[in-house]
Amino acid sequence: MDSSATDLAWRVEEACIKACPSPRQALLEGWLVRLSGGPTRRTNSVNPQRGGDHDPRPLMTAFDRLYRAQGQPTLYRAPSMAVGMAAALDAAGLAPQAETRTLFTEMAQPPVADAAVELLSRPSEPWFDLRFQLNGGEDASFRRMTAAIALPCAFAALRLEGQVAAIAYGAIDQGPMIIEAVATAPEARNRGLARRTVGTLMAWGRAQGADAAALQVAADNAPAVAVYQGLGFDRELYRYHYRSRPD
């Protein structure tokens, strides 16, 4: 990865952290330790920072202490541009899991907004209802996370027969817009709802001054990747995965 690509990857990584904030976190010698509680791994993991030493082994005892105090396992999140981090975690005996791709697009010509997609400044209860239905139930930590977003943002909802059937949100950080929480009700899938919802967020972001968009998707989720590629997300900036102790 050349220096300009590395710089863009870190810029998008930092924007993703701001778009998905952890209300409880700590900085420890160049590492961002996120401790939100709840099931979301990104907001409950040790994250490297740009320009630091990416070998976490000297601080593993300190990380364990922080997570143990919250009754949580220690989880490491390893972006591919954090040089040396994956090798250090290999040496510590922590196996990789849950690889995710970060996709990117310039937005010179974003999709046209869909008038049927509702844009909200804060998520509505029906918006939360679909999110929680698809993610195993009520999650107070996710509510706190959305309330903590400091970036300009919009929450999109698309209804079918009066019920919210597709959701997502977008947050803009000095240029790129990060798209998060894309989801469609099981009974409404394969009908183009995610494309319409994300496309409308892209149109909103461009109107607000965003010049690019990025999102993160599980590496093995081929149907979602195909939808995003159809919206212009044809460039992969970096990947990340998680590591934790076997016990």
Image (tube, rainbow, N blue to C red):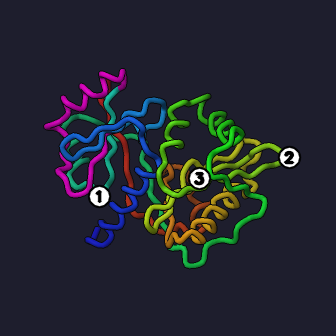
Quadrant the N terminus occupies: bottom left
Q: Kindly identify which residue carries mark 1.
A: 81
Q: Kindly identify which residue carries mark 2.
A: 161
**Seen in the image, is 204 located left or right of residue 237?**
right
**Seen in the image, is 129 located left or right of residue 239?**
right
Q: Mark 2: which secondary structure?
A: loop
Quadrant the C terminus occupies: top left
CA gap between label 3 and label 1 equals 26 Å
Residue at image point 63% right, 47% down: 183
Q: Give the percent coordinates (x, y) of residue 69.
A: 30, 22
**Seen in the image, is 122 located left or right of residue 100?**
right
Q: Amino acid at mark 2?
A: Glu
Relative to the observer, which residue lies in front, 171 or 195? 171
The residue mark sitting in front, 1 or 2, is 2
Q: Amino acid at mark 1?
A: Met
Q: Earlier in the sequence, mark 3 or mark 2?
A: 2
Q: Kindly identify which residue carries mark 3.
A: 169
Residue at image point 45% right, 55% down: 101
Q: Give the percent coordinates (x, y) of residue 155.
A: 63, 52
